[in-house]
C-alpha cells in the first residue's frame, strides 16, 4: 500500500549516471582489472609492496572516511526546499529574500537532537535543532534555531559546562542521548537560570511526533533593519502547517529500539511521497523604543515573548521538497552559523548569541578540516563570491594572477567592496557605553516567573506528563542530594509539581512557596495547535476472509483525507477478502509495532486463528495505552471486548456508529485521547 519508490527503482536511478564510466584513481588514472582486487605483492605469498599506490590511495581514503561528529547536534537529518515571503517586509527589513512574494529562495534545513552521538536513537528526550540555510541572492542567511524558544543558559561562557553535564558521563560514557543522569541534574540545580528551559525539555515538546510537526524558534532576539536604517527587535518562529504534536514517553523509548531512525524515515518518506513538509515563518517584532517595556529583559535568551502580548506575524512559507542525494556530502558537511546574516538582519547584545558568533566558525575549522568549508557544494552561496582569502586545507578555487590583496592598482582594485546602497553589509550602529565587566545584568535574574508561566499554560494532561518526566529523570539520578536540590529548585515554579515529583522519587516534599505568577499563555499548550489528519499513519490489522464490503469504503474515506494506510497481518504476501479480492500486506506483527503508527483499525478476518488475535490484542492494547485512536469494524469489536477498551474515548466501533469513517477520522485528528483511563 505504500506509494514511495521501491528500493530497486531508486537503485536503478542512482546507478544510471555511473553506467559506462571507467574506474580511475583520484588522479584520473584508469584502474586495471587486477588492481582493485589484489594488493601488489612480492610473489603470490610475499609481502605487500609500498609502491602499490592504488592500495594506499584506496585505504587512506577509507581510513579517513569519517570526520569528527558535531560536538552537539551530532544526530541530524536534512532536506532541501524553498522559501517564499507572503508580502513584502520592506517596512521592517531590507533583506532581499523578504521583499518579493514571487521570489523563491532555496533552503537547506537540518534537524537534529542535541545530546546524543551520531548513531543515537532519535526519540531521546531532548531539544531538537532546527537549522535553516537560506541561499539568498545576497549571500547565505542561516537561522540556526531549536524547537524550544528559550535556552538553558544566559551566557555563552556556560555552554561547555552545560554540554559536559548533559553528555554521557566521561568515566563510563553512559547514558547515551539522555539527560536522566546525575551530572545533568546537578548542573540544573546549581545553575538555576536553566529552570524555564528544563520545563520545556520535561514537557511533550522534547519528544516530537515528527520533524514535520514541531515548531522552530530563532531563540535569540535579532534585529530587522530597513532601508532607512530603522531597527526593530525580532524573534523568529517556524510554525508547522500540520500542527505541533508529540508522542508519549513510553512510546518514545520503545521507538528508539523499534526504529531509531523514526524521525528521519518520516521526513524522507513524506518527501519521497510528494507530501512536502511546510512551515510558516512568523516574526514577533518590538520597536526599538519599547526595549524596556516588558517585565523581563528582551535580550535574555531564557525568556520568550508571550504571543498574546507580542503577536506572531506570519510572513512566509517554507516547503521541503527534495531529499538529499548524499547524507555525508550534504547533511554532514553543511556548516551553519548564526553569524551568517544578510543586509537587513543584524544581532543584538544577547550574551548567548554573542558567544555563538565565535563558536560556529571555530568548530567548523576542526570538523571540516580548515578554513575552506564554504567551498563545499552544500555551503556555497548561490551568488558569486570573491575576495583575497587564499589557500588553506582543502582549497578548491584555483585563483589566478599575482594580486591577492586590497587595495591594489595592478588589478584595478578588484575585487572591490560595495557601498551600503550597493548592498554592502553595514552593522547597525548601536550605541555602546559601559565598563569592561564580567557580570550578569540584574534584569536577567528572575529565573522562575516564565517557568511558572509555562506550567500555568499547560493542560492537565500536559502537566501530568511534565510531572512524569521529572519523576522518570530524577528517578534515574543516584545522588539523593541532587534529587533534593532539584525538587527544592522547582518548588519556585509550582508547588504541585515539586510536591508530586518529591513523592514519586521518595524525597521529602518541599514547603510551599508563595508563587505570585498567575498568568498563562494559551499559545504554549499543544492542545491549542492545528489538528490535521494529513499523512497520519494508520495500521490496518487484517486477516483472510475480512468483509470487503464493510472495510473497503472506510479505507477509501481515510485515503481521501490524506491518511496513510499500512496493512498488517500474520504473514507477508496478501490477504484475501470474503469476496476473494487480494490485498497486499505491508508488515507482519514481527516487523511492525503499534508505536510506528498514529492509529489502529482492526478490520477483521482470520476469525478462527487464535494466535492471530493474540498478536492483534497486544498491538491494539499498546496503542490504547499510548492514547491512540482505535477503530474496529465488525468482528474486530470482539477483540476490543476482550481487551475491555470499547467504551473509552477515541475507540470507535462500526456497530455503534452511524458514520464510522467520519467518527474515526475525527478521532485521529484529536491525535491522543488523554481522558482515557490507562493503568
Ligand atoms: Fe549551537 N552549536 N551553540 N545552539 N547549535 C553548534 O556548531 C553553541 C545554541 C544549534 O544542524 C555547534 O557545527 C554555543 C542555541 C543548532 O549543523 C557549535 C552556544 C541554539 C546546531 C555550537 C550554542 C543552538 C548547533 C556544534 C551557546 C538555538 C546544529 C557543531 C552560546 C538557537 C546545526 C556545529 C547543524 C551546533 C555552539 C547554543 C542551535 C559547537 C557556544 C541557543 C541547531 O558551534
Image: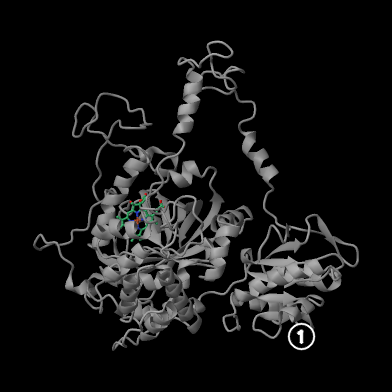
Looking at the rendered structure, the number of numbered marks drawn on it comes to 1
Q: Dot 1 corresponds to which residue? A: 656
Q: Is residue 566 left or right of residue 335?
A: right
Q: Is residue 299 left or right of residue 268?
A: left
Q: Is residue 355 left or right of residue 523?
A: left
Hey, which residue is sitting farthest top in the picture?
43
- Look at 37% across and 49% down and name the residue there: 140
Instruction: Please provide percent x and percent y for residue 304.
Output: 33, 72
Residue 410 can be seen in this image:
yes
* Quarter of the view holding residue 595: bottom right
The front one of 131 and 647 is 647
Vertical placement of 128 versus 664: above or below? above
- Look at 75% across and 84% down and name the residue there: 657
Q: Quadrant of ligand 1?
A: bottom left
Vertical placement of 462 versus 62: above or below? below
Q: In the rendered image, which quarter contains the C terminus?
A: bottom right
The front one of 485 and 403 is 485
- Look at 48% across and 72% down and name the residue there: 204
Instruction: Please provide percent x and percent y for residue 606.
Output: 84, 67
The front one of 618 and 16 is 618
Some atom of ligand 1 lies within 8 Å of the CB belonging to the residue at label 1? no
* Quarter of the view holding residue 631: bottom right
The front one of 59 and 286 is 59
Hey, which residue is sitting farthest left in the picture?
435
Instruction: Please provide percent x and percent y for residue 244.
Output: 50, 70
Amino acid at each position: 500500500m505504500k506509494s514511495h519508490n521501491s528500493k530497486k527503482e531508486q537503485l536503478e536511478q542512482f546507478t544510471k549516471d555511473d553506467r559506462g564510466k571507467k574506474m580511475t584513481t583520484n588522479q584520473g588514472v584508469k584502474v586495471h582489472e587486477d588492481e582493485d582486487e589484489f594488493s601488489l605483492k612480492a610473489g603470490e605469498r610475499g609481502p605487500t609492496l609500498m609502491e602499490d599506490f592504488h592500495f594506499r590511495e584506496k585505504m587512506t581514503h577509507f581510513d579517513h572516511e569519517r570526520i569528527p561528529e558535531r560536538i552537539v547536534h551530532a544526530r541530524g537529518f536534512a532536506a532541501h526546499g524553498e522559501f517564499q515571503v507572503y508580502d513584502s517586509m520592506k517596512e521592517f527589513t531590507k533583506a532581499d529574500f523578504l521583499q518579493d512574494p514571487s521570489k523563491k529562495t532555496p533552503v537547506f534545513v537540518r534537524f537534529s537532537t542535541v545530546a546524543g552521538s551520531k548513531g543515537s536513537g532519535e526519540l531521546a528526550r531532548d531539544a531538537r535543532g532546527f537549522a535553516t540555510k537560506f541561499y539568498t541572492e545576497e549571500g547565505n542567511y542561516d537561522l540556526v534555531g531549536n524547537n524550544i524558544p528559550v535556552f538553558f543558559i544566559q551566557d555563552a561562557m556556560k555552554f561547555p559546562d552545560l554540554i559536559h553535564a548533559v553528555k554521557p558521563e566521561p568515566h563510563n560514557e553512559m547514558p547515551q542521548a539522555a539527560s536522566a543522569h546525575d551530572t545533568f541534574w546537578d548542573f540544573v540545580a546549581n545553575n538555576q537560570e536553566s529552570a524555564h528551559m528544563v520545563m520545556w525539555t520535561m514537557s511533550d515538546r522534547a519528544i516530537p511526533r515528527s520533524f514535520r510537526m514541531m515548531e522552530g524558534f530563532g531563540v535569540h532576539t535579532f534585529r530587522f533593519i530597513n532601508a532607512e536604517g530603522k531597527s526593530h527587535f525580532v524573534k523568529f518562529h517556524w510554525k508547522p502547517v500540520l500542527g505541533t504534536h508529540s508522542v508519549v514517553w513510553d512510546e518514545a523509548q520503545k521507538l528508539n529500539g523499534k526504529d531509531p531512525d523514526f524521525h528521519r524515515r518520516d521526513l524522507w518518506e513524506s518527501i519521497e511521497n510528494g507530501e512536502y513538509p511546510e512551515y510558516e515563518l512568523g516574526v514577533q517584532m518590538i520597536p526599538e523604543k519599547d526595549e524596556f517595556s516588558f517585565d523581563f529583559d528582551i535580550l535574555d535568551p531564557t525568556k520568550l515573548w508571550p504571543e498574546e502580548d507580542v503577536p506572531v506575524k506570519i510572513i512566509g512559507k517554507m516547503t521541503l521538497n527534495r531529499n538529499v542525494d548524499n547524507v555525508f556530502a550534504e547533511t554532514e558537511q553543511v556548516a551553519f552559523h548564526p553569524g551568517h546574516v544578510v543586509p537587513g538582519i543584524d544581532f543584538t547584545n544577547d550574551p548567548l548569541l554573542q558567544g555563538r558568533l565565535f563558536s560556529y566558525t571555530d568548530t567548523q575549522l576542526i570538523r571540516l578540516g580548515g578554513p575552506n568549508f564554504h567551498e563545499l557544494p552544500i555551503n556555497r552561496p548561490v551568488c558569486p563570491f570573491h575576495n583575497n582569502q587564499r589557500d588553506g586545507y582543502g582549497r578548491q578555487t584555483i585563483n589566478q594572477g599575482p594580486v591577492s590583496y586590497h587595495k591594489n592598482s595592478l588589478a584595478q582594485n578588484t575585487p572591490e567592496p560595495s557601498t551600503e546602497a550597493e548592498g554592502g553589509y553595514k552593522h547597525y550602529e548601536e550605541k555602546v557605553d559601559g565598563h569592561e565587566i564580567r557580570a550578569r545584568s540584574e534584569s536577567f535574574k528572575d529565573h522562575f516567573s516564565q517557568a511558572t508561566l509555562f506550567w500555568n499554560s499547560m493542560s492537565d494532561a500536559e502537566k501530568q506528563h511534565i510531572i512524569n518526566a521529572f519523576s522518570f529523570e530524577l528517578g534515574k539520578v543516584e545522588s539523593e542530594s541532587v534529587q533534593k536540590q532539584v525538587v527544592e529548585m522547582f518548588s519556585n515554579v509550582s508547588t504541585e509539581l515539586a510536591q508530586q515529583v518529591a513523592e514519586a522519587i521518595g524525597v521529602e516534599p518541599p514547603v510551599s512557596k508563595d508563587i505570585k505568577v498567575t498568568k498563562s499563555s494559551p499559545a504554549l499548550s499543544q492542545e491549542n495547535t492545528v489538528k490535521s489528519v494529513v499523512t497520519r499513519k494508520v495500521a490496518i490489522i487484517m486477516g483472510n476472509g475480512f468483509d470487503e464490503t464493510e472495510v473497503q469504503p472506510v479505507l477509501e474515506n481515510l485515503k481521501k483525507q490524506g491518511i496513510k494506510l499500512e496493512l498488517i497481518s500474520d504473514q507477508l504476501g496478501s490477504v484475501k477478502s470474503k469476496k476473494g479480492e487480494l490485498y497486499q500486506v505491508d508488515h507482519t506483527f514481527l516487523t511492525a509495532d503499534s508505536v510506528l503508527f498514529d492509529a489502529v483499525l482492526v478490520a477483521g478476518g482470520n476469525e478462527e486463528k487464535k494466535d492471530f488475535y493474540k498478536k492483534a490484542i497486544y498491538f491494539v492494547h499498546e496503542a490504547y495505552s499510548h492514547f491512540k485512536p482505535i477503530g474496529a469494524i465488525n468482528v474486530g469489536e470482539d477483540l476490543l471486548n476482550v481487551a475491555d477498551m470499547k467504551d473509552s474515548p477515541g475507540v470507535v466501533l462500526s456497530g455503534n456508529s452511524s458514520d464510522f469513517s467520519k467518527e474515526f477520522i475525527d478521532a485521529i485528528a484529536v491525535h491522543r485521547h488523554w481522558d482515557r483511563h490507562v493503568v
